[in-house]
Amino acid sequence: MDKEKILQRLNQLNKNTLMETLDIKFIDIGENFLTAKMPVNSKVHQPFGLLHGGATAALAETVGSAASQCSLIDVKTKITVGLELNINHIKSKKKGILYAKATVIHKGKTTHLWEIKIIDEKNDLISVCKLTNIVLDKQ
């Protein structure tokens, strides 16, 4: 596995998407995990100047879905899509960087379950998420 090529390809796929709008970048990949980062600034704030929970959820689903897709053996005929996202927000954030690491809990033939922990640059836990993805045939 050439980590740099995979990360480069994943980041290229973000062009002209919500991920590009939110400045989400994939930064590390390994056996059963994927990590991405996202800056916290006014683009991801709610009206009170705090990190919007929806932006956090978008980061979590982005990294969990990409991790699921990367873990497929047959990427030519299969895709993964989100089925359910559960997220608990633990700490608020006004500015800085978020790091989301998706780690596999279960990888079956038709469903994948990922835990996504979101921390900040101080290593403070911001959110904890679980994402269930379904594996589908490409149409």
Image: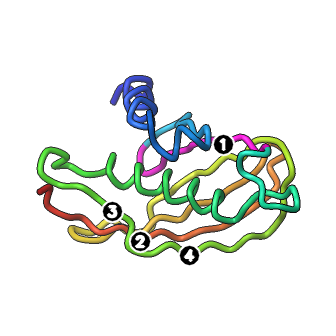
Structural distance between the alpha carbons of marks 1 and 4 = 19 Å
Structural distance between the alpha carbons of marks 4 and 2 = 9 Å
Residue plotted at (48% across, 49% down): 33
Which residue does the numbered mark 2 point to in the structure image?
132
Instruction: Name the N-terminal-most of marks 1 and 3.
Output: 1
Q: Amino acid at mark 1?
A: Met
Rendered-image quadrant of the C terminus: bottom left
Residue 51, x across and y down, in percent: 78, 57
Q: Amino acid at mark 2?
A: Thr
| Mark linked to residue 86 | 4
Residue 52 position by quadrant: bottom right
Residue plotted at (33% across, 30% down): 1
Instruction: Name the N-terminal-most of marks 2 and 1.
Output: 1
Which residue does the numbered mark 3 point to in the structure image?
81
Q: Amino acid at mark 4?
A: Asn
Residue 89, x across and y down, in percent: 73, 70
| Mark linked to residue 38 | 1
